[in-house]
C-alpha cells in the first residue's frame, strides 16, 4: 500500500497523510489516529524522496571531513550519525582528501542532493577560499572548527590553543628545553593556530625554537610523522622532547625513534594531540591532549537541527575544554642541557 491508497482509505488528502506521519501536531487527534492505524496495519514505510517533494525536506544531513584515515573523523561521523538517526535524519559522509578541488566537487554533489543541512568537520577543508563554494547553498551549516572571524556560520570546537599550551607546559615542567615541533599540513587553519600558540608559549618560558626543530607532516599519515622524526634525529643536538600536532604524527615519530635504537621517553619524550584510541594501546602509551570527538559531533548535530527547526536562530560559537592525558611517552629530562 502506498501513500495514495492510505489517503483514499482514510478519506483524506495525500498531504494530510504526509502531515500525520511527519508533522502529527498539525493534524487533529481523531484524523491522525485513523491515518496512523492504517499506516501500521499496512506496514507502510515512508519514501524519503517522495516525502521531500511534499515537505521540501529530505531528512538528510551532509558531513564533510578532510579524511577518514584519522580515527577522530570516524568518531565524528559516529557521534553525528547517532544523534541524527535518533531524530529521524540520515547522514551522508564525504571525505575531501584535504583538497580544495575535491572539496568543490563535494559541495556540488551536496547541492544536487538538496540536503537539509551541512556539518563541516576539520581544518582539512578550512583552507583559503573554503567559504566561497558554500555561498549559494541555502541550508544551515555548522562547522566543527574554531572560526573567530566568521559571522555567518555557527561553530563548535575544542579549545586547542589552551591544549597546545598544556602540552608544552607539560614538557617544560618535566625540565625539557630542547623541544621540537612536528606541525601538520601547511595552509590549514589548525596548523597556523597551533603554531602561533606554540611559539607564544615557548616565548613566555624563554625557550627558543631552532629552525631545524620545526618540521611539517601530514595529519592523516603516521608515516609522515616517521619521516618528520627522521629529520629531527639528524639535528645536533637532538631534541629531548617533541610535540606532534596530532596523534597520528606522534605515533609515527615514536616508531621512528625506536627503529633508530633510541628510547621513548628516556631519550626523547613525545606528546600528541587528539587522544585517538590507538594511543592508549601502543608501547609506551602516548601522552596526549584529549578532545571529546563524540561529544563535539553530537553537539554539532544538535546545533544544526535547532537551526533547521528555527532558521532565525543566531549564529553561535561554542568552545569546549580539552584535557591532558599523561601516559608513558613522556618523562622528566635528566640530561644536561646543551645550547
Image (cartoon, helix red, strand yellow):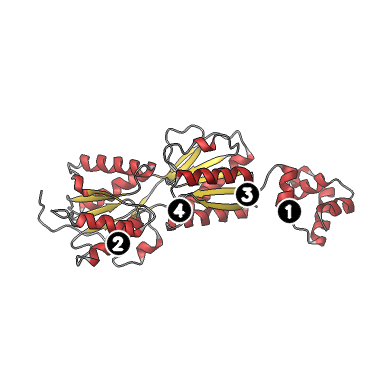
CB contact under 8 Å: marks 4 and 3: no
Q: CA distance from mark 3 to mark 1?
A: 13 Å
Disc on the earlier residue, 4 or 2? 4
The residue that appears at 43% across and 53% down in the rendered structure is 292
Does residue 28 appear anywhere in the picture?
A: no
Location of mark 3 (residue) = 60
Disc on the earlier residue, 2 or 1? 1
Q: CA distance from mark 4 to mark 3?
A: 21 Å
Location of mark 2 (residue) = 327
* Depth order, front residue of 329/57: 57
Structural crowding at the residue carrying mark 2, measured as other residues with C-alpha within 10 Å and reported as few (<14), some (14–19) or many (≥20): some
Q: CA distance from mark 2 to mark 3?
A: 40 Å
- In this view, the mark in front (4 or 1): 4
> Does residue 230 lie above or below 216 as drawn?
below
Q: In which quadrant of the rendered view does residue 309 lie? A: top right
Structural crowding at the residue carrying mark 1, measured as other residues with C-alpha within 10 Å and reported as few (<14), some (14–19) or many (≥20): few
Location of mark 4 (residue) = 67
Does residue 35 appear anywhere in the picture?
A: yes
The residue that appears at 38% across and 54% down in the rendered structure is 274
294 on left or right of 196: right
Q: In x, y percent, where is residue 197?
A: 30, 41
Secondary structure of residue under mark 1? loop
Amino acid at each position: 500500500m502506498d501513500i495514495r491508497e492510505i489517503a483514499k482509505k482514510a478519506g483524506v488528502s495525500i498531504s494530510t497523510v504526509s502531515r500525520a506521519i511527519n508533522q502529527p501536531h498539525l493534524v487533529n487527534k481523531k484524523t491522525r489516529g485513523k491515518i496512523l492505524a492504517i499506516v501500521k496495519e499496512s506496514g507502510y514505510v515512508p519514501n524519503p524522496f517522495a516525502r521531500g517533494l511534499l515537505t521540501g525536506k529530505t531528512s538528510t544531513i551532509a558531513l564533510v571531513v578532510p579524511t577518514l584515515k584519522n580515527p577522530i573523523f570516524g568518531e565524528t561521523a559516529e557521534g553525528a550519525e547517532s544523534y541524527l538517526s535518533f531524530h529521524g535524519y540520515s547522514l551522508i559522509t564525504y571525505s575531501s582528501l584535504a583538497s580544495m578541488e575535491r572539496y568543490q566537487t563535494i559541495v556540488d554533489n551536496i547541492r544536487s542532493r538538496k540536503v537539509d543541512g551541512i556539518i563541516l568537520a576539520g581544518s582539512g577543508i578550512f583552507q583559503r577560499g573554503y567559504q566561497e563554494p558554500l555561498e549559494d547553498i541555502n541550508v544551515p551549516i555548522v562547522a566543527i572548527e574554531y572560526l573567530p572571524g566568521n559571522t555567518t556560520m555557527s561553530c563548535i570546537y575544542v579549545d586547542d590553543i589552551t591544549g597546545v599550551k598544556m602540552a608544552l607546559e607539560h614538557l617544560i615542567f618535566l625540565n625539557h628545553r630542547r623541544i621540537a615541533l612536528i606541525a601538520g599540513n601547511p595552509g590549514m587553519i589548525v596548523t597556523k593556530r597551533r603554531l602561533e600558540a606554540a611559539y607564544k608559549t615557548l616565548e613566555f618560558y624563554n625557550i627558543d625554537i631552532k629552525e631545524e626543530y620545526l618540521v611539517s607532516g601530514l595529519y592523516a599519515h603516521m608515516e609522515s610523522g616517521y619521516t618528520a622524526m627522521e629529520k629531527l634525529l639528524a639535528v645536533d643536538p637532538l631534541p629531548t622532547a617533541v610535540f606532534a600536532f596530532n596523534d597520528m604524527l606522534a605515533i609515527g615519530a615514536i616508531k621512528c625513534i625506536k627503529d633508530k635504537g633510541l628510547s621513548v621517553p628516556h631519550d626523547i619524550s613525545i606528546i600528541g594531540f587528539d587522544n585517538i584510541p590507538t594511543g592508549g594501546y601502543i608501547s609506551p602509551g602516548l601522552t596526549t591532549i584529549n578532545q571529546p570527538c563524540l561529544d563535539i559531533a553530537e553537539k554539532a548535530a544538535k546545533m544544526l537541527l535547532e537551526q533547521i527547526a528555527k532558521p532565525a536562530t543566531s549564529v553561535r560559537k561554542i568552545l569546549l575544554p580539552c584535557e591532558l592525558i599523561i601516559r608513558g611517552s613522556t618523562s622528566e629530562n635528566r640530561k644536561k642541557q646543551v645550547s
